[in-house]
Amino acid sequence: MADDAAAILIADGALGCEVGKIIGRAPTANSARNPVMLRAYFDRIRPATLKRLQAKLRAAKMLANGSTPGQCLVRDPGWATMWQEHFAPLRIGRRFLIVPPWLRERDPARIRLVIRPGQAFGTGHHPSTSGTLGVLEELCKNRRIARGLDVGTGSGILAIAMANLGVAEVTAIDVDMAAVANAKENARLNRVGARIRFSTTPLASLRGRFGLITANILSSTLIRMAPDLKARLGHRGHLVLAGILRREAQSVAAAYTPELSQVGTGNHGTWTTLIFQR
């Protein structure tokens, strides 16, 4: 009943609700489950409103016997920066160390990628991003790639990784202007801004071919973009597709073959990375 009770509270102005078990309470004769505590957060609440909500919840039989809603003041402990504590340094593959800009951690054996979490996707924590970084690490080993393209760049992490792995010239595009702004900032933090051209230019409007292309997007978008992505891939170039659920991999692959050869597949939990070559 917690969800129903939360709906009532939110309809009466609650900003949100939190459900937690009550410790030390046994199930009642009329309930197969333990009672739970429901906390609702308001900017402010009048005593009359609290009393009215109590009556409404009790009439709906949502209050345990003897339970009386109370209120307490929650002071801001610094929410604006507390979330930063969750972004610990992240090691991916054999070569990457991803850190937010407020941490100084370094590893001489790894390439340090500084990524500021923002509205754009891509901090390295999602399997589709980490899987693609692992593929880039292998594809760029002992190879010189003149031009790279990152489609749907988000935070810019893949484009920045390409530049750090030695790709001479990188183009990164995204339809979201906020993502492009975030990506440019991250490139500046990594001192590779001069080697990456960020823009909102549509894929279909790009000219030339690329030796390495990454696209970490939804499967439906990858299928729709297949003709344009294939057209932009150079001779013997590699195309890395991610953001694909394992159950969708076959459908995505079918959109790229037989024009391209599938030369690799990486599974990361429920996510898949596909690698093609012309």
Image: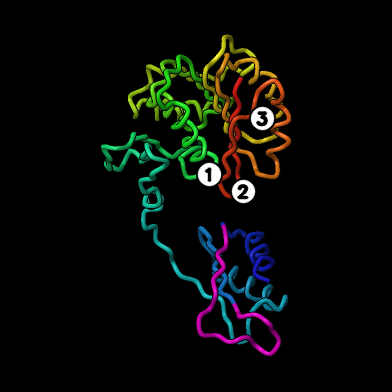
Relative to 119, does residue 68 appear above or below in the rendering? below
Residue 248 spot, x, y in % from top left: 70, 40
**Which mark is drawn over residue 127?**
1
How crowded pointer 2 is (Cα within 10 Å; few <14, some 14-19, many 20+) is rated as few
- Please say which color scheme the image uses: rainbow
Pointer 2: what residue? 270
Pointers 1 and 3 in contact (C-beta within 8 Å): no
- Which of the 4 image quarters holds residue 174? top right
Q: In percent of the image, x 42 and y 42: which residue is there?
A: 92
Which mark is first along the chain, 2 or 3?
3
Q: As rendered, which of 179 and 206 lies closer to the eye?
A: 206
Q: Looking at the picture, which amino acid does disc 1 mark?
A: Pro
Q: Quick check: is 28 in the magenta stretch? A: yes
Q: Is residue 252 left or right of residue 273?
A: right
Q: Looking at the picture, which amino acid does disc 2 mark?
A: Thr
CA gap, disc 1 to disc 3? Answer: 17 Å
CA gap, disc 2 to disc 1? Answer: 9 Å
Pointers 2 and 1 in contact (C-beta within 8 Å): yes
Most prominent secondary structure in the magenta stretch? loop
